Amino acid sequence: MPAKSSITGDGGKSCPSARAEPGNLLIGVVGGDGIVQPLPTRLEIDAGFVEQASKSGVPEARFRFGGRCVEGKCKQWTGNSCGVIEKVLTGMADQNIMPVEHLPRCVLRGTCRWYSQRGADACRACVFVVTDHSAVATADA
């Protein structure tokens, strides 16, 4: 019997930009346009998935995962909230990137740290977040 997902059942918050680790959820796939396509159902990943996905590079550059929000144990924690969604929303405003019009489907919304902080604004920006850009090639300027 698989272990119970680390992000369900205890009333804690979920991180919508977690690492590919067994017990976390696969919540989206990064499309060729860099936009995350959310999955319609909860899909818990296991060690086999992580191993297979890692063979083609950093999984977090191609997929989005949800896990437990660890608050102060995370380098993105500002002391009272997650800094990631704040940076994303500020960056989008600075670059005149319009958030998506409708809330995308989401398997985490009920426990999502970002949604609890910024509500629908976070959801509309979430599809633009790629957790790890280290594998993304950049053109010479």
Image (spheres, rainbow, N blue to C red):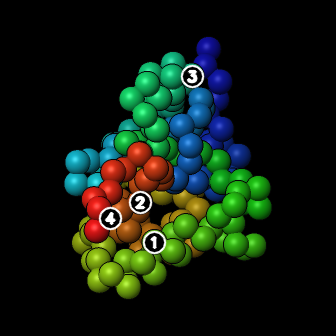
Type of the residue with mark 1: Val
Q: Which residue is mark 1?
A: 88
* Position of residue 117 measured from the top left corner of the image (x, y, whole percent): 57, 73
- Going from the N terminus, do you reach mark 1 or mark 2 first? 1
Could you say which is closer to the camera, residue 108 or residue 58? 58
Mark 2 residue crowding within 10 angstroms, few (<14) / some (14–19) / many (20+): some
Which residue does the numbered mark 3 point to in the structure image?
Answer: 47
Which of pointers 1 and 3 lies earlier in the amino acid sequence? 3
Q: Tag 2, which secondary structure?
A: loop
> Who comes first in sequence, dot 4 or dot 1?
1
Q: Could you say which quadrant of the image residue 63 lies in?
A: top left
The residue carrying mark 4 is 103
The residue that disc 2 covers is: 129
Quarter occupied by residue 97: bottom left
Nearer-N-terminus badge (3/2): 3
State how far apart marks 3 and 2 are (Cα): 24 Å
The answer to whether marks 1 and 2 mark residues whose Cβ atoms lie closer than 8 Å is yes
